[in-house]
Image (cartoon, rainbow, N blue to C red):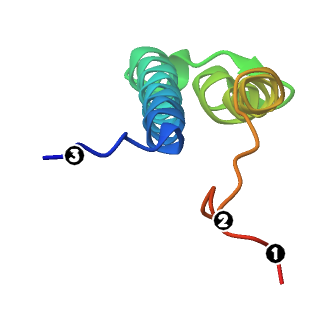
Amino acid sequence: MRQEKEDPRFKIANREALIGVGLVLFNFIWWFGFAYGMGSKSPEEYTYVLGLPAWFFYSCVLGLIVMSVLVFIIVKFFFVDVSFEEEGEESS
């Protein structure tokens, strides 16, 4: 019985999916930590950054910037371009 070789594109796709899940978990932990860590105080005790409550600035504004930079770096340096065509197929 001949065993077919696994397509290497699946290994790449699985790796990139795990990286994506890691980024989502990091984003959630970042957001949750700042939003509930700093935002659990009474509103009278809030500190402000650029006119926004510090918990909101760090969790939402800075979090967006950090995640955008991380996604750019990950896509630029860790993701690879993969052809969707079968290896044996010829272009028409």
Q: Which residue is mark 1?
A: 91
Residue name at image x 62 percent, y 32 percent: 56
Q: CA distance from mark 1 to mark 2?
A: 9 Å
Alpha-carbon span between mark 1 and mark 3: 28 Å
- Quick check: 41 above or below 86? above
Under mark 3, the amino acid is Arg
> 75 left or right of 14?
right
* Label 2 environment density (alpha carbons within 10 Å; few <14, some 14–19, many ≥20): few
- Going by the numbered disc 1, the residue's amino acid type is Ser
Front one among 64 and 25: 25
Q: Horizontal placement of 84 versus 34: left or right?
A: right
* Sequence-first disc among 1 and 2: 2
Q: Residue under label 3, please give it.
A: 2
In front: label 3 or label 2: 3
Q: Residue furthest bottom?
A: 92
* Residue annotated with mark 2: 85
**Tags 1 and 2 touching, CB below 8 Å:** yes
> In the rendered view, does 46 fall on the left or right side of 57?
left
Residue type, label 2: Glu
Residue most extreme to the front = 1
- Tell me the CA gap for discs 3 and 2: 23 Å
Secondary structure state at the residue bearing disc 2? loop
Quarter of the image that includes the C terminus: bottom right
